Amino acid sequence: MDAIVRVDFELRWSMPVYVLSDDGAEKPIFGPHDALRYLRDCSAIAPVSNYELAIDACERCMSREIDRALARALFVSAYTNYTMLRM
């Protein structure tokens, strides 16, 4: 029998993460669903392991397998590495 996996697309972090768009405007990332969209849209020039860890963490967070704070921290780490390589 197949298992039903519940995914929470409305899950939010306690505090949003603000990322910079290409035009320099700040964009809020409110939770793991927003983070997944952002990570999939940005080019994966960041260290692949960091990028993949962040994607996996956000997906697992939405399935309530890991804590929101951990997913947020891994997203921040991947975003930081990504922006450092763009400089």
Image (spheres, grey):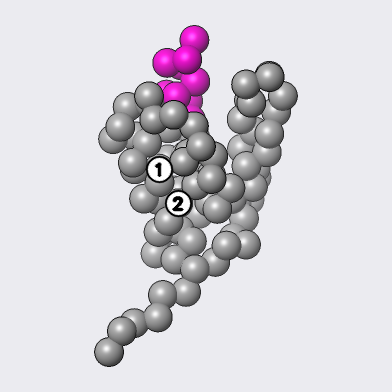
| Residue 20 locus on image (x, y percent) | 63, 25
Instruction: Identify the element where label 1 is drawn.
Output: helix
Residue found at x 49% / y 32%: 42
Q: Is residue 30 above or below residue 51?
A: below
Classify mark 1: residues with Cα within 10 Å, few (<14), some (14-19) or many (20+).
many
Instruction: Identify the element where label 2 is drawn.
Output: helix
- Residue in the foreground of this view, choosing between 6 and 67: 6
Q: Residue furthest bottom?
A: 1
Q: Which residue is mark 1?
A: 54
Q: Which residue is mark 2?
A: 58
Which amino acid type is marked by label 1?
Ala
For residue 52, which quarter of the picture?
top left
| Residue 28 locus on image (x, y percent) | 68, 38
* Predominant SS of the magenta segment: helix
Q: Is residue 69 above or below residue 40?
A: below
32 within the magenta span: no
Which amino acid type is marked by label 2?
Cys
| Residue 53 locus on image (x, y percent) | 34, 43
Q: Decide if residue 32 is on the left or right side of residue 10.
A: left
82 within the magenta span: yes
So how many labels did they put on this image?
A: 2
| Residue 8 locus on image (x, y percent) | 54, 66
Evaluate if marks 2 and 1 touch, with contact meaning CB atoms under 8 Å apart. Answer: yes
Q: Is residue 62 above or below residue 13?
A: below
For residue 49, which quarter of the picture?
top left
Q: Which residues are magenta?
A: 79-87
- As measured in the structure, the alpha-carbon distance from the residue carrying label 2 to the one carrying label 1 is 6 Å
- Looking at the image, can residue 41 be seen? yes
- Looking at the image, can residue 67 be seen? no
Residue found at x 45% / y 51%: 58
